[in-house]
Image (cartoon, rainbow, N blue to C red):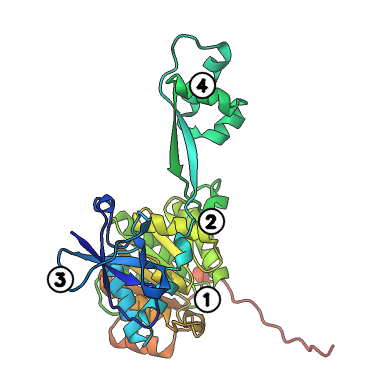
Amino acid sequence: MKYALVLVNIKGLGVKTFSYLIPDEMREIIQIGQAVLVPFGRQGLINAFVVGFSDYLPEEFKAKKINKILDETPLFSLKYLKLLEWVANYYCTDFVTVLNAALPMKLIEKNAKVEQSVSLLKEDGEGLTKRQKEILALLKERGKSSLIEFEEIAKTTRATMKKLAEAGFVKFETEYIYRNPLSIFKDVEVEPLFELAGEQITAYEGIKSKMRSPNPILLHGVTASGKTEVYFKLIKDVIDSGKNVLFLAPEIALASQLTKRLARKFGIRDVAIWHSSISDGEKYDVWQRLFKNEIKILAGARSAVFAPLQNIGLIIIDEEHESAYKQTNPAPRYDARVVARRLAQFHQAPLLLGSATPDISTYYYATNNNNLFEMRKRFNNSPLAKPQVINMQE
C-alpha cells in the first residue's frame, strides 16, 4: 500500500476522500480508523481519518505526505463509519458534523495518560546493601507496581531505584493508564442477581424467544414491576454468550444511577459509562477500551449510541418514551432510538425498549409484530404510594 485515503475534518466536503503518500516509516503501523495530521491547501496541517488504502494514483496527481499519526490506536472500524454515514444521510447533515459529534477531536489531543511501572528482574546478587534487599523483597511481594506508588510504600527515592535498575535488579516500563469514572465503586462487592418471579419470568422467557427478531421488542411494565431485574438477567445471558450490551437511559442522572447498579451486579472491570459530563481523559480511555473490546456493558445517555462498542448482542433503551432521546441542538439533530435501531440492524442484535408509559407508535408496532410483553403488577404486589391533595394557599 502506497497511498492512504483520508477523510479531512472540514465541513462541506461530505464523504469525499483524499489520497496522501504514506511515508516509509509509517507503512508498518498505519491502519484504518487512525487519526492523522495532513497538509490541506491554505488550511495548513489539519486532522484527518484514514478510511482506506490504494497502490495507484493517476500520473497527473502528486500526493502530499502524511505529516503525523496522531494516535496509533484506531478510533473506529469501517462498520462504525458506515453507521455515521447512514446518520448523516438520514438526517440530511454534513458527514463531518456527525463525525465530530461522535468522535470529538479533542479526545485524541494529549489525553493519553502514561505512567512508569517497576518490576523485579532478580532479587539476589553481589553488592546489595541491607536496605536494597528490603526494597527488592517488598517488590517481589507486591509484584509489578506503579513506580511512584512503590517509592512511597517502600519509603525510597528515585535515585535508589535507578541504581537498582542500572545494576539489572529491576526494570522500568512506560505504560498507558486507563482512567475509569467507575473507580469510586472499586470497593463495592459484586452482588448476585435477584431471582425472577411471576410476571418477570414470563416476560424474560418471552423476550428470550424473540432475540432473533428484526423488529424492536417492547417491555411494557408498570412502575416498580421489576423491569430492571429482567434487563439484568438478559444482560447476563448475552455477556455469557460472549457478546456485549449497550444500555441507554434518557438523562445523565438516570444513566449514572443505572451504571452504579450495573457495577454492583457485574463489576467495574466489565462496565463503563458514556455521557457528556465525564471528563475528556476518562472518555478517551473508555473509547480506547471499547475499541479493544475490553468492555462488556456500556451504559449512557443518548450520545452513547455513537460509542464504538464492539460485538453488540443486545441494545436496551429504558424509558423509551422520553423526549430526551432526541437532540434538537446543536447539530447533528438526531433521535437516539432511531440510530439505535439502525445500530441493532448492523450488528444483527435485538433492540429492547422498556417503559411504563410507552410511546403510542412503539406500542402499536410492537403489538402488530407480536413483540409486546407486559408486566401489569408491581413486584410482590407492593401498594402504590398514596397521593394527597395539598392546598398550596395554606
- Image quarter of the N terminus: bottom left
- For the residues labelled 3 and 4, the Cα–Cα distance comes to 58 Å
Q: Secondary structure at mark 3?
A: loop
- For the residues labelled 3 and 1, the Cα–Cα distance comes to 68 Å
The amino acid sitting under disc 1 is Thr
| Residue 114 falls left or right of residue 24 | right
The percent coordinates of residue 290 (x first, y second) are: 38, 58
Q: Secondary structure at mark 1?
A: loop
Residue marked by disc 4: 163
Residue marked by disc 2: 181
Which residue occupies the extreme top position in the image? Answer: 126
The amino acid sitting under disc 4 is Lys
Asked whether the beta carbons under mark 3 and mark 1 sit within 8 Å of each other, the answer is no
Quarter of the image for residue 97 reads bottom left
| Residue 72 falls left or right of residue 277 | left
- For the residues labelled 1 and 4, the Cα–Cα distance comes to 65 Å
Q: Is residue 183 placed above or below 309 in the rendered structure? A: above
Residue marked by disc 3: 59
Closer to the camera in the image, 160 or 136? 160
Closer to the camera in the image, 115 or 57? 57
Residue 220 visible in the picture: no
- Kindly report which numbered mark, 3 or 1, lies closer to the viewer in this rendering: 3
Residue 169 visible in the picture: yes
